[in-house]
Amino acid sequence: MTIVHQLLPNAAPGDAITNQAFAWRELLAGWGHPGEIVAEHVHPDLMGKVQRLDRSGKRLLAQGKIVLRYAIWSKTAELALRRPDHLALCYHNITPGRFLRAFNPELAALCDRGRQALARFARPKVLIADSSFNADDLRKAGLGEPTVVPLLLDMARPRQRPIEAHPDPTVLSVGRIVPNKRLEDVLKAFALYQRHRAPRASLVLVGSAVGFENYRSALERLVERLGAQRVFLTGPLSSHARDAWYGHADAYVSMSVHEGFCAPLVEAIAHGIPVVARGAGAVPETLGGAGIVLDGEDLSLVAEALHEVVSSTETRTALAAAGARRLAELSPAAVAPRIRAALAPVLEGG
Amino acid sequence: MSRIVIRTPAEEGDYELRLTLVQEGVAWFDELDGSGASLHRVRIVRPASGNVASMSETPAEPEIDVERLVEELKERVARERAAGTYADAGSGIELEMLPLEPSPQPALAQRFDLGTPGPRIRFRPELGFSTKPVIGPVITLFKKFVLRLLSFVLDDLARQADAAVTRLETALSAEIAARESAQTDLIEVATRHEMLQSSLEQLEARLARLERTQQTQ
């Protein structure tokens, strides 16, 4: 029985990486590899479920194998890399600082530091990337050939939704309010869609703007200048309230220019929402043909694609079918064996 | 073309048939790469007579050629543009860069350098040094003794002040957390209200349609 602990910089409810750590812990325990989740910063709601990286946390890590979840620079990486023979590095990608610098230079510097540090890492025993896009970063850093394993997302079967077009459609985008999501493009495309195709359409942006409050303010000013109506920035929501918006939406839009995987795309598919997205980063790979992928340069085309997925029964039906196929490929039953095969060198190392 | 004999499950129903290869003792191909398997949705049906169940592939779901659809959309947008629609696409309205807000101040306790180990008051024996001839060393010794006593008293006062500042900050943090939590709850309530409002409007529209239908009948 090999003990496998997972190490992450921050543990918070609703955070995608924390959710992955919990899902993997359950999976690993089922295979007879118990372990703890250890984080440098632990949200008060997770106290007791996640071990803090204090003296006892460090003692824990010295005893078992470590899965390091790497998504920003933190001292967790320094600590884990002291034992590369016992380490599985799971790379979730780090947003390049250039996308963030104008609004949060401190975080941009931390992100750049995290990316630059990859090249100085000792080669871990196991190298895992969420997507081929992320795997390229690891290859470029000279860390070797990673195994691509998508995120472990336990999605319910795709929801059966009314297939006819809604007269007052709701367009949804979920994710942190950060500049690399290019929400200004989402607003501009939506303004065109509302002006020319669906005057009673609404746009809902769900996500926290912590650290990027000035970006949110700039977006709110842009809404006024574009003359768009019924645009709602909800701020952070509980998973229940977020799912309610998924259940209400008629189309999902993403104009992000950098994504290492983008779990909300899969969530949208699971809720039966047709997706229109810019084909940047790992987005085309994550969608796997179950959404409309555009280069995002022509925002009129984005507006027209929104109109198509909202109004065409045929397109909605075909995208729903493609979504069901994609969900089967990303189901825990399909992903779990890939995780096990990827982790085999550390699990079998004793 | 190869023929594969498969023992079907005893229960009727829709199943997923996954065909893949294995290198014994190493791995299944699809465990290494999800595309290394051939997936089929099959329906198992037990005939009215006989014990052997039959298997047939379930009807294919509609396929979508996204690339072709995007090409069609591009042509449609070009036609719409020629007709004057989307003329405002390049309106030149861009995101305005707002001046960066100053970084939040570090926590009060950090600014006061609280919680650091060791004494809060630095004992400086050099302050008790006397240059007087002959009795200087005695005076120095006496002054050092008094300074040492004072440093204990001052250190105790400093620790009491530390504790007061820390208590104050804890109370402030709790209040900030409570306010943030209340704000989040408020946003959720507003969101739900918005959704209920929208549902109500839809229901009203449906009701109006139903009333119209009834009137026409």
Image (tube, coloured by chain):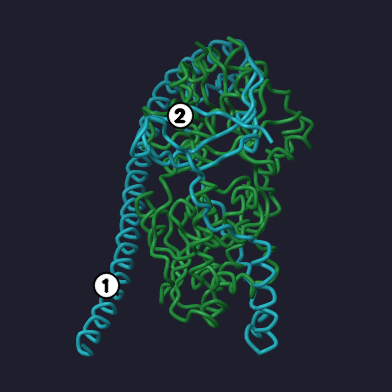
Quadrant in the picture for residue B204? bottom left
Closer-to-camera residue (B16/A306)? B16
Q: Is residue B72 above or below residue B9?
A: below
Give x and y (percent) for residue A158.
43, 51
Q: Which amino acid, mark 1?
A: Leu
Q: Which amino acid, mark 2?
A: Gly
- The Cα atoms of the two marked residues, 2 and 1, are separated by 56 Å
Say which residue appears at 41% left-offset and 72% top-offset. Answer: A166
Q: Is residue B91 visible?
A: yes
Q: Is residue B125 above or below residue A131?
A: above
Q: Earlier in the sequence, mark 2 or mark 1?
A: 2
Q: Which residue is mark 1?
A: B200
Q: Chain of mark 1?
A: B
Q: Which residue is mark 2?
A: B115
Q: Is residue A39 above or below residue B27?
A: below
Say which residue appears at 70% left-offset and 68% top-offset. Answer: A297
Judging by colour alone, the chain drawn in green in this rendered image is A
